[in-house]
Image: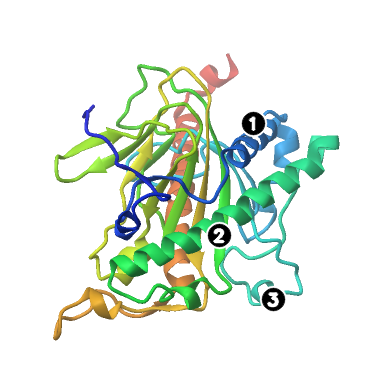
Amino acid sequence: MAKLEIPIIDFSEDPAEKKKVVDQILGHSVPVDKQAKALQCAKKLFNLPLEEKEKVSKNNNTWNRGYEMLRSQILEEGTQPELKEGFYIGDEIPKSHPYFVNKKLNSGPNQWPEALGDDLEDFKYQTMDYYRSTLNLASDLMRVLALSLDLKEDYFSDFLDGAVATMRLLHYPSQPKDADEKLTRGIGAHTDFGAITMLLQDDVDGLQVWDQKNNTWIDVQPTRGAFVVNLGNLMARWTNEKYKSNVHRVINKTGKERYSIPVFVSGNPDYVVDCIPTCKSPGEEAKFKPATVEEVVSASYAESYGRAQLYKQGLEKKAESKVESTPLQQVAA
């Protein structure tokens, strides 16, 4: 693995640094103790028995809230379903809200694990408090991006007004050290779907980003208090690919359990994403047609989960074929 390093930028220092597209940030507005409490919540949740977690399965609804089992998703073609389990949380959107009524992207009430018992109310408070703090940070980051693109600092304010953002508590079981890296992933190589992602890691390695210039994967060493920041496909589209979405993956071969918490900022689902004026030269054509946030992000979700479903269907067909081809006397043996 390459020894190249991911830059760490301190947001509290030189204002000029804030104009850079950063990979890890410190000196931000989210306290370290709030980060630690959120990670503790993730550990409590995933320590519950599987049957209790399944009671709040995200399959209970169509708006991506609740528990997701291991091997539910394939983000990288040609690999097996991913070795991670997750729990989706977002704004508490009641069924009377226009977003819910109109079936907007990832919009609806949360599901909460009653099996946490006396810890449930604290779990709700800590996770939602952390979620709201990261949304404030997202506003800071979007102002930074605006400045970096020679735009007014508040350029993205309409995009953030009524923004949809989804938080995932994630747990990666340890993979065997001799696991086939070509097939087995904690999460496969992918780019994020929305505009910007803020990822909190625990102290366990596993995250890697693709360095296209050097044609290699770089380990992203966990840094206490830091957020790893990824730009997503929506931002790449918006900037006419002046900014690229970061390719990254997780392969957890440390022998330890790994926990992380990404917050994915998609934006206002009705906002129309069209090429930013400063991102193309006079006379240059935009690479992408205008589209709403809802259209762009929903298509990416459908593709990744559809890939996992097709994989599982393929396994079922193989199993059925094997049974059909097995001699009757062997089945009865």
Disc number placed over residue 43 in the picture, else none: 1
Q: In the rendered image, which quarter is residue 235 located in?
A: bottom left
The spot of residue 325 in percent (x, y) is: 44, 30
- Position above or below: 58 against 114: below
Instruction: Bin the neighbour count of mark 1 within 10 Å (Cα to Cα): few under 14, some 14-19, many 20 and up.
Output: some
Residue positioned 68% across, 71% down in the render:
100
Q: Residues within 10 Å of mark 2 (few under 14, many from 20)?
A: few
Front one among 266 and 305: 266
Which one is earlier in the sequence, the residue at label 2 or at label 3? 3
Q: Are marks 1 and 3 in contact (CB under 8 Å)?
A: no
Q: Which amino acid, mark 2?
A: Asn
Mark 1 vs mark 2, CA separation in Å: 24 Å
Nearer to us of marks 1 and 2 is 2
Q: Can the viewer see residue 194 in this picture?
A: no
- Compared with 294, 92 (above or below) is above
Q: Secondary structure at mark 1?
A: helix
Q: Which residue in the protein does label 2 denote?
A: 136
| Distance (Cα) linking label 2 and label 3 | 26 Å
Q: Position of residue 70 (x, y in %)?
A: 55, 36
Which tag, 1 or 2, sits closer to the chain's start? 1
- Residues at circles 1 and 2 in contact by the CB criterion of under 8 Å: no
In the image, is 25 to the left or to the right of 236? right
Residue position marked by numbered label 3 in the rendering: 101
Question: x, y percentage for residue 319?
Answer: 48, 33
> Hey, which residue is sitting farthest bottom in the picture?
283
Look at discs 2 and 3 and give the one toward the viewer.
2
The quadrant of the picture occupied by the N terminus is: top left
Q: How is the image coloured?
A: rainbow
Q: Position of residue 16 (x, y in %)?
A: 30, 58
Badge 3 element:
helix
Point 42% across, 20% down: residue: 254
